[in-house]
Amino acid sequence: MDLNFGKCCGSKKEESWRSVLLLAYQSLGVVYGDLSISPLYVFKSTFAEDIRHSETNEEIFGVLSFVFWTLTLVPLLKYVFIVLRADDNGEGGTFALYSLICRHVKVSLLPNRQVADEALSTYKLEHPPEKNHDSCVKRYLEKHKWLHTALLLLVLLGTCMVIGDGLLTPAISVFSAVSGLEMNMSKEHHQYAVIPITCFILVCLFALQHFGTHRVGFVFAPIVLTWLLCISGIGLYNIIQWNPHVYKALSPKYMFMFLRKTRVSGWMSLGGILLCITGAEAMFADLGHFNYAAIQIAFTFLVYPALILAYMGQAAYLSQHHNSAHAIGFYISVPKCVHWPVLVIAILASVVGSQAIISGTFSIINQSQSLGCFPRVKVIHTSDKIHGQIYIPEINWMLMVLCIAVTIGFRDVKHLGNASGLAVMAVMLVTTCLMSLVIVLCWHKPPILALLFLLFFGSIELLYFSASLTKFREGAWLPILLSLFFMIIMFVWHYTTIKKYEFDLQNKVSLEWLLALGPSLGISRVPGIGLVFTDLTSGIPANFSRFVTNLPAFHRVLVFVCVKSVPVPFVPAAERYLVGRVGPVDHRSYRCIVRYGYRDVHQDVDSFETELVTKLGDFIRYDWHKRRTQEEEDTARSSESSRLAVIGTVAYEIEENLQPESVSIGFTTVESMEDVIEMAAPTTTVKRVRFAVEEESYEEEEEEEELRSELRDLVAAQEAGTAFILGHSHVKAKQGSSVMKRLAVNFGYNFLRRNCRGPDVALKVPPVSLLEVGMVYVV
C-alpha cells in the first residue's frame, strides 16, 4: 500500500510539473512576446534625438546600465517576486488588486452587496486580520467616502492606460520589426514600403484573435522561443567578437556618469530606456491565463537572461562602431550573414509581442464590465478547459482600426515610443499604488513596509514617467487623450448604474403590496414561470409593479431573479444560487440571486432556465425538510419569511443578525430577509447552519401532499413556458441638476445604452420569451 501510494504521489508530482512547464512554454507566446521584442527599439528610441553616441562610450554604457537595473528591479524584483503573489484566487491585473482590497476593506462602490457573499469559498482572506491589529490606514479609508471614489478613479485610470497600450504596442512592435528593411532598401522606397506592410501585418494579427489564446499560444510560443535564442546568441557573439569587457557597464556607477555628462538631455532620453520594460505588466494581467509558477519560471530562467545578453551584445557592438552609415538600432548589430532570417523572425516575434497586450486588454475590459464599470460588450470564452481565456469582438476591431490609424499618423518609432512609454509607466504607477495598499490591508504587514515599497518603486517609475511627460507634444499626448476618453465613458457608465440602483432601491414596493394582488383587484395568475430580472436583492422592483399595473396578470410561479457580480474571480457552481421564498408557500413566489465572479462564464438561457428550475425544486424539498425539523412557532414564522439558502450539492442556510440601522430605510415595509442587506453594518454577524438533505428524507417529504402539490405546480409551470420580464430603461437627470450631470446622464449614458448590448442580449434571452417593461429613471 505504501509503495503504491508513493508511486501515485510521484506520478501526480511529475504530472503537475509537466503541466507547469507546458504552461511556461505556452506563456512565451502570450505573456512575453511584448517584453522580448523590446531590443528592437530601445536603443533606437533612446538615441533618436536627445543624446548622441560619442567616442568615450559613456552614453552607450550608461544606457546599458540603466536597462540592466531597470529590467532587474521592475520586472524581476517587483513583478515576479512581489506583485505576482498578490493574485486574486489566481487572477491578476488592476481590477484583481482592487477586488482584493474591497474584500478586506469596505471601499467597494458596487451595488447590492450582501454579507452572504463573504460566505463564498473564493471570498477567502488569506491573512485574516488580528482583532488587536486594526490598521489606521483601513480606518481612514473606510471613514472618508471620497477616498472610495478616488480609489475607483485610480483603477479606471490604470484600466484606460492598458487599453491605450493595447493599441500602441502592436503599432510600435510591428513597425520596428519591419523597419529592418531600411538596411536593404533606399530611403525613398523604404518610406513607401514600411507603412503598408505594417498595416497588413496588423490586420492579420487582429483577425487571428477569434481563434483564442489557447491556440494562438501554441502557434506563437515556438516563434518567441526561437527569437529569444536568436537575440541571446547574437548578443553573445557580439560580446565575444567586439567587447568582452562590456559586462563592466552593468555597474550602477555608469548610470551616474551618464547623467553627469548628459544632464537634462540624459534625463529626457529615459523616455526611450523605459521601453525595455514594456510588457512587464502583461505578466500580471495575464496571470489568469496561466499561473504564478509558469510565469515565474519562464521569465527567470529564459526571458530575463536572453534580454540581458541581447542588450549587452548591442552595447558591445556600438562601443566599437561610432560612425555607422545607419542610425543606431537593433539591425546594425546583426551579422550580415543572418540578417534576412533574423528580419523574418523579428517580424513574426513582433506579431507575437502584440498578442500579450491584446490578451491583457481583453481580460481587463471583461473584469471592468463585470464590476459595472464598462458598457456591455460580447465576451466569447475561447477555451472550455482553460479558465479566463476570452475574446471580445467589438474591442478587437476597435483596437485594430485605432492601431492602424496611429501607425499611419505617426510613421516613426520615436513618436510611437513616446506614446507607448507614457502608457506603460502610468499603468505601473497605478499597480505600485494599489500594491502598497494590498501590503497593508490584505497582507497585514507594517505600514512602513508598504511605504518603502511605494517610495522605492514609485520613485523609479516617477523618474521615467516625468521623462515621458516632456515628450507630450511628440506623441505622449495620445495615451493621455485616449485614457481621458475611455475614463469618461467608464465613469459615466458606472456613475449612472449606481444612480439607477439607488432609484430602484428608493422605489421598490413592499411585500404586502404583492400579497394583496388577487382576483378581488382584477389580477389573475396565468400558467407558466415569470422570471422578473432586477438588480435588487430584496423587495419588489418597481418595474414589476408597473408591469402589473399595465397588464393585470402575472405567472403562476413568480421568481425575482438578481444576476449580480461579486468581487471575486469566480463563484463555484455549488454556491452560485441563493434561493428563498417571497411570501407564504401558497403564493408560489420565490427569490433567486445568481452570483458570478468577474471571470465567470455566464450561462446561456437554456441551461440557466433548466438549472434554475432544478434549484427551485431542490429548495422546495430542502425548505419542507427544514420545516419538519423545526418547532411549530418557527414553522409559522418561516412560512411568511423570505429566508435564502445556498442550493448546491449540499444545502445550507445563511442567517444574519441585523441591526435596524443596517437595513435600507425610506420604505414603508421591509421584507424579512435575514440574508439580504443593502448596507452592511459593522455589527453584523454571520451564522451558517448547514443541513445535509439525504435521499431518505426526500422520500419522506414526497409523502406530504403540500410538498407534492408545490412540486407539481413547478413542473406544470415549466411545461407551460417561461417568460423573461426585463426593464427597458430610459435615464434622465433630475431637474436642477448641473450641466455636467445632464450631459453625462441625458446624452452620454443614453447614447452608450442605445449603442451597446442590452441586458436581454447579455443574458441571451430569446426574443419570443421576452417581456420588456418601460421605465424612466430620474436620477
Image (cartoon, grey):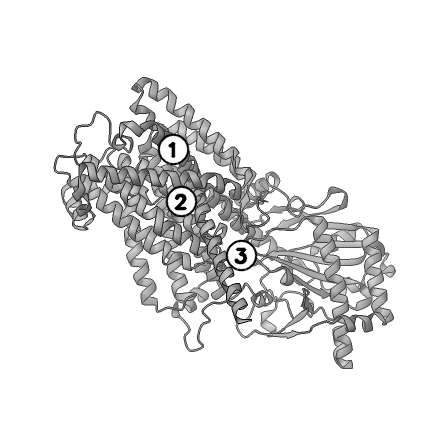
| Label drawn at residue 569 | 3
Residue 239, quarter of picture: top left
Tell me which numbered mark, 3 or 1, is placed earlier along the sequence: 1
Check disc 2 and report its element: helix, strand or loop.
Answer: loop
First-in-chain label (2 vs 1): 2
Q: Quadrant of residue 169?
A: top left
Q: CA distance from mark 2 to mark 1?
A: 15 Å
Q: CA distance from mark 3 to mark 2?
A: 23 Å
Task: Using residue 513 as the reference point, say whether residue 216 is left or right of it.
Answer: left
Q: Nearer the viewer, mark 3 or mark 2?
A: 2
Quick one: label 2, few (<14), some, or many (20+) residues within 10 Å?
many
Residue on which the image places disc 2: 32
Q: Nearer the viewer, residue 97 or 203?
A: 203
- Say which residue label 1 marks: 345
Q: Residues within 10 Å of mark 1 (few under 14, many from 20)?
A: some
Tell me the kind of residue under disc 1. Ile
